Structures are given as C-alpha cells and as structure tokens.
DNA sequence: CCAGTAACTTGATCCAGATCAATCGCTGGC
DNA sequence: GCCAGCGATTGATCTGGATCAAGTTACTGG
C-alpha cells in the first residue's frame, strides 16, 4: 500500500469560485447563485495515485469527474486484453460522459500521476442543468467538443504518415497547455512512449525514432519526459490535420453532383 | 438543375407520432404533450438529392437534422483538400451535434442517395429540453452514444489488420440495420468502395480484395452494392473490436501499480 | 550504493498493405 | 445500340513502418 498521501482536505474543498480552472471546467459562465448550487453537489474524493483507476470499463456509471490536478489516460480493452488508449486528460476536463447512454463505463480511466478530481453525481448534475439553462448549454458544449476532438483524432489515425501523427499530438498538447496558461513550447509528458504509440496507432520504436528525427531536424529538444518545442509552426505544418481552422465558406448553396 | 423531386408534402409533414423511427430518434420516451411541442419546432425541408450537401464544413450552425430516409456521409477536409470520411448516417440518427460548441459545422454532410430530413433549430430544441427533462436526458444520451461510437471507430483504426477493420464495418452496419428492423444479413451499401476505404483508413484496392477474400472464405456474398452475409458470427469474431460487450468487472477497488 | 527491472533507444530485417498499372463492366447519354 | 466514363476488380511491385533483437539509461526497492 502506498503511503498516505499528504493532502490538506481544506484545499480539496470544492469551491468552484476559487478554482483556477474556472474558465475551462463546468462552472464557466454560471452566475454566483448557480455556482453555489453546483458546488453543493460536487463531492470530495481522496487523490488518485499514479497507476490507480478513477473508474474501470464495465463499472456502473454514477458520476462524471472534473480533473483538478494531474493527468489521466482513458482506454478500452478488447477480449484478448489488448488495450487501446483513447486519450489523455488534463486539468479542467470532464471525464466519463461516454458512459451516459449505457449507464456503464465503456472505458477505464487510470492516473498517469497523482490526480485530484471533483466527483459530480450525474443524476444530480442532470437535474441541476434542468434548472440552469447555462449549465445545460455548457454540458452540450462540452460533449460536442469531445465529439469534435474524437473526429480530429480519428482523422489523424486514418491519415498516413507517422511524422504528422506525432506532430499532431504535440501540437494538440501545446494547444491544451496554452488554454491552461502554461507554456506552449515547454512541458513534461506525463505518459509513457508506449501510451503515445498506442494512442497514435504505431510502435514504440517508431515514436523513439521520430523524437530523435525531430530533434535532428531542430524542431524540438527532448530529454525523456521533458519536451521543448523549437519550431512550433513547423510542427503545425507537419500536423496539418482535421482542418479545424475552418475555411470561410459560409454560404448555404447546395451542390448537385449527380 | 435536377428534376423537381416527386414528394408528397403531406407525407413529409412532421409528425413524430406517426414516424416509424420513433424509437430511434429524438422523441423516444416523450409523452403525448411533449411530443406535440417537439413536432411544433421541427421544420420541413425539401429532400436532399444524391451528392447534395445537407451542410458544409465552415457553415454557421443553426440546426441539427434527424434523418427520415436515405443515408449520408460526413467528412472533413484538410488544407490540401484531402477528405476524411467520419461516418455514414442512417434513418433515425441525429446529425450535426459536433457543431454545438463552436457554432460552426466542423464537417460536411453529403447525401449518398435521396435523403429526407427533419430540421430542428438547435436553440429551440435547447429551450424545449430545458422544459422537458426526458428530452434533455435523451439528448445527453444521443451525444454520449456518438462519443462511444467514435471511440469504437478510433479503436478500429488504431488496430492493425485490414480484415478486422472491414469485418467491424460490416458487423456494425448489420447491427444498425437490425435496430431499424431490417435484415441483419442482407443489405445494400449506399456508399462507394472509395468511401468505405477512406473511413477505414485503407486503399480501395484493399477493400476490393477483401470482399473477394471474404467471399472465397464463404463469409459473405457480394455483388456490387449488394451484400449478403453468410457467416455473421465469423465476421463478429474477426471484428472483435472496442470490447463494447463489457466484462463483468463491476467492483470499485483501485489497483496500485506504483 | 547496488542489483534488478522497466522504459527507452538504436539497428537490422521483414511484410502487410499501399501504389502503380491494366482491364473489366455497369450506367447513362445520345 | 453504341460509346464514354467512372467505379470496381485484379495483378505486380514497392515501401513505410512493424517486428525482432540488442543494448543503454534511469528509476526502484533493498
């Protein structure tokens, strides 16, 4: 058993108002009073240590989880026990919404480092969002974002070259750190090369070689977990995925191509 | 310009109560009165002919669309104009929810054959679901299903063999036809081999060869668009993806692996 | 401080599936 | 009925990245 983690429960007290992730997380855009109501249904939870599970595939779904600190990976496993990493999750993100439709978790969430989360019982969240239009809208938004993100990931996987896959991954991480106010060019990877390889549908060896290659090309410096991006724009060009920067075509005409 | 389609507007009148897709679509689980309210906000729309777009990537998002008849494909395109097919969509499905968060369509939806849809202005749907708990819940469910489906697709793409990808695709189609009360073993593919190849991240030639191979193995018979599955179970075994048939592990214990 | 192990890197080889090329055969227009 | 053209099939070749095989480095617990 790992040593009892040193956490001040006071600091873990749920208080969306004081939370630095305010703008990323659920409470975004809520008013003072509504925020208090949301705070009321959020439950404390002891930190999840590295390697522990927040939930496992197959467990009954009761809550969604907002990440306060640390990072997790989510993954499915098939009958032969082969794992497929679905994504990595950073502070401010909401986890577990894929389980709403079946009331059962369809993937597992495992901590990549010590993680602190806010547990939000979904039935209470649902009835609350029935009363607070802003909350309902925000939940729709969050789920829609997840769909969009999956589309992006899917495009990366279907697309050929391994260079562009890894570039996509790094650029996306950079973007996500940016949204959290961290450096866009310097960060630590909390996940193993194996997890990255799995997420991107390639072999570990290839990840290793690509990091070396990118370094030789002067695109970045990498030292184990630590990554320093030197040419972010070049990486973005390499990535060139899912075309999320949308073309300015906004007319409603329909094209007949029969 | 294509010839004016022959449609009886009466038949197109939105009437969820009479719609055969009742159980698949939005109104599922709603009571009589609520159903009428939903019907009220649904707009008629002239059929979308084969090759025409329901919406295009980059257009402003206003509505989601419920498919009444026909099928569509959705796809993104990147800067070089490379298309990535994201999925095929059948009657009873709701389209366009990925656009909620940005208020802009992040992919295009194109008809694979003549398609009839119910257009549902999203702002009105949102305020209606604020009043009808069942509707809100159902929307959450639908979006959650989409996330889950994307996870499955993603797993298929990341996983190696082409056999299992095509098998997955066929089994999934079979399941979806089943839910609509059609044959699980005999159906027509409304999409081209090219579209299938693109969706599954492989070359058209490979799709062709696999169909031949599957046929030689006695798994199915295929004649252009028409598919007759002879060994559904075998195909399911080949597919063996995303492990959606969840293992019975429902305890809440956490594993320390530090 | 050291042994043992896990994570990562690097090199050599191999193969699944892409690409290239040719043909077939429906389908629709005239 | 004939021809143009696109979609699908089939065959031959090629290659990107997997796999196999050794190291190397860093972290763990004793």
Image (tube, coloured by chain):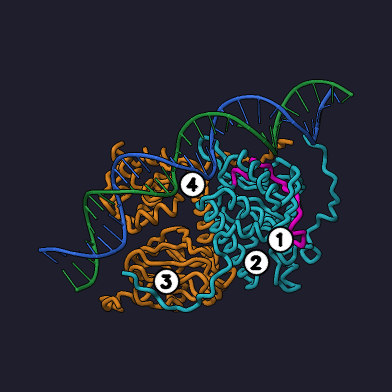
Chain colours: A orange, B cyan, C blue, D green
Instruction: Determine the chain carrying the residue at label 4.
Output: A
Measure the C-alpha gap from mark 4 to mark 1: 37 Å
Locate residue B224, reporting x and y percent. Answer: 74, 42
> Mark 4 or mark 1, which is nearer to you?
4
> Could you tell me which quadrant the C terminus of chain A lies in?
top right
**Mark 1 secondary-structure assignment:** helix
Label 2 close to label 1 by CB (< 8 Å): yes
What range of the chain is rendered magenta?
B175-199
Residue A128 in view, yes or no: no
Q: Which residue is mark 2?
A: B128
Give the CA distance from mark 2 to mark 3: 34 Å
Residue A47 shows in the view:
yes
- x and y percentages locating residue B165 in the rendered image: 58, 51
Left or right, residue A158 beside residue B24: left
Q: Do badges 4 and 2 share one subunit?
A: no
Q: Are marks 2 and 3 on the same chain?
A: no
Q: Quadrant of residue B209?
A: top right
User: Which residue in the structure is indicated by mark 3?
Assistant: A54
The numbered mark at residue B41 is: 1
Q: Position of residue B254 (x, y in %)?
A: 40, 75
């Amino acid at each position: 058993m790992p040593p009892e983690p040193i956490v001040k429960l006071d600091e873990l007290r749920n208080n969306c108002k004081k939370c630095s992730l305010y703008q990323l997380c659920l409470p975004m855009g809520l008013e003072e009073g509504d925020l208090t109501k949301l705070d009321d249904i959020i439950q404390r939870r002891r930190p999840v240590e590295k390697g522990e599970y927040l939930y496992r595939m197959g467990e009954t779904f009761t809550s969604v989880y907002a990440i306060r600190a640390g990072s997790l990976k989510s993954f499915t496993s098939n009958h032969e026990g082969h794992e497929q990493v679905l994504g990595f999750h950073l502070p401010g993100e909401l986890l577990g919404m894929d389980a709403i439709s079946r009331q059962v978790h369809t993937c597992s969430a495992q901590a990549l480092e010590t993680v602190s989360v806010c547990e939000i019982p979904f039935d209470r969240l649902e009835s609350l969002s029935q009363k607070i239009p802003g909350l309902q809208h925000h939940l729709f938004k969050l789920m829609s974002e997840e769909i969009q993100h999956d589309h992006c990931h899917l495009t990366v996987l279907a697309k050929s070259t391994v260079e562009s896959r890894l570039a996509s991954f790094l650029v996306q991480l950079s973007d996500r750190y940016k949204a959290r106010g961290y450096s866009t060019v310097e960060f630590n990877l909390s996940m193993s090369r194996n997890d990255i390889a799995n997420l991107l549908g390639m072999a570990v060896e290839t990840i290793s070689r690509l990091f070396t290659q990118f370094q030789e090309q002067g695109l970045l410096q990498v030292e184990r977990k630590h990554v320093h991006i030197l040419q972010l724009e070049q990486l973005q060009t390499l990535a060139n995925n899912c075309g999320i920067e949308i073309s300015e075509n906004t007319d409603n005409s329909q094209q007949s191509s029969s």
